[in-house]
Image (spheres, helix red, strand yellow):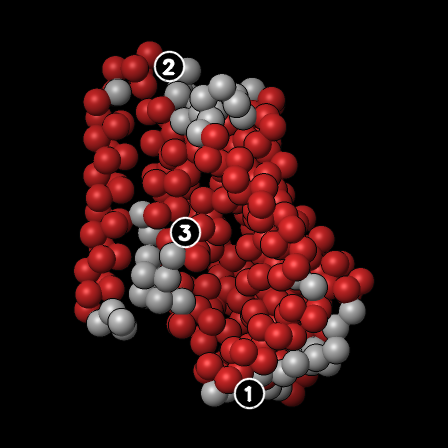
Amino acid sequence: MKIPKPLKTIIAIGIAVAVFYFLGRSIYRSWDELMRSEVRFNIFYLMLSIGFFIAGSLATGYAWQLALRLLGANMTYWQSIRVIAISLFGKYLPGKVWAFGGRVLMSKQYGVGEAESSTALLIETVGLTFAAFAVFLCSLGFYRSAILPTQVYWSFLLIPLGLILMHPKTLKTILKLLARLTKRSIKVPNLSYANLAKLYAYYLLLWVIHSLGFFFLTESIFPASYESILPLIGAYSISWILGFLVLIAPGGLGVREGLLAFFLKFVIPVPIAALLAILSRIWITIGEILFLVISLIKKERRSEEVEKTGN
């Protein structure tokens, strides 16, 4: 049964309000404990965290280029950056159609067909999803296993599933199925496993860069030990991607923060985990705005050069 759009919006708002309420309540009830803990503010680590976020965002432009080249399409690096940066803000609308549709429409302006950009988006979504799970699975051994729910370890079953889904033949089958369901033109290319593996490895690197930014965000308010790097990276990657996959939550709002606080509590004190979950949303939004500004500044500079050449 199809859920009406107004109901989806209400559910999304309800989830976000409920999660932020419980996170806020956790911080309020533990305020004294929070003040007695080693909370501090370190501007150096904060700036470093934003630097990593921007670096990871800029690296996505190259990943988008790689995906398009596999499909015989091309786009310059700064065109790719601009398309990604502007379409990013579509994710804050209910459903993921605006984020996906926005990138397809903008790519069309640079001469990339809908079939190629839609296919590249599917490859990117599958790649980023399983790269996030891979990072999370690698981090599990560094959690305190005595208190980590045993159900979490069922996620190791995703390893064979991921290898199957990322195989070129499986990907072609998915593309053909999506083409029939959506009645849209989706290119079904001849892909080699070697080229896809290279792209997936790059997606893995993107998660590491972004997640290191989150680690330094944590360091900016709480002295986390370097032994907790992998658990923090894993918590960030899995909460981000699961929030993304929940279609009714715009930008994963509420879902991402709730999951992040859940996994962080096994690594750092609960009130710090709740505080970081809320701060992460602000941090990501600021990072995305700066990423957008960088893409637009580059555009203006190029326009100025064209104008000077014309004169």
* Label 1 secondary element: loop
Instruction: Of the two numbered discs 3 and 1 on the same chain, state the one appearing first in sequence.
Output: 1
Mark nearer the viewer, 2 or 1 = 1
Q: Residues within 10 Å of mark 2 (few under 14, many from 20)?
A: few
**75 or 225, nearer to the observer:** 225
Q: Which residue in the rendered view is the most extreme toward the top?
A: 36
* Label 3 secondary element: helix
Q: Mark 2 to mark 3: distance in Å?
A: 29 Å
Q: Quadrant of the N terminus?
A: bottom left
Q: Mark 3 to mark 1: distance in Å?
A: 28 Å
Amino acid under disc 3: Gly
Which mark, by number, is residue 37?
A: 2
Which mark, by number, is residue 20?
A: none
Q: Is residue 261 above or below residue 76?
A: above
State left or right for residue 49 relative to residue 282: right
- Quadrant assignment, res 258: top left
Q: Are marks 3 and 1 in contact (CB under 8 Å)?
A: no
Tally of marks: 3
**170 or 287, nearer to the observer:** 170
Amino acid under disc 1: Ser
* Label 2 secondary element: loop
Residue at image point 19% right, 65% down: 7
Amino acid under disc 2: Ser
Residue 276 position in % (x across, y down): 39, 33
Residue that mark 1 sits on: 185
Q: Is residue 169 above or below residue 187?
A: above
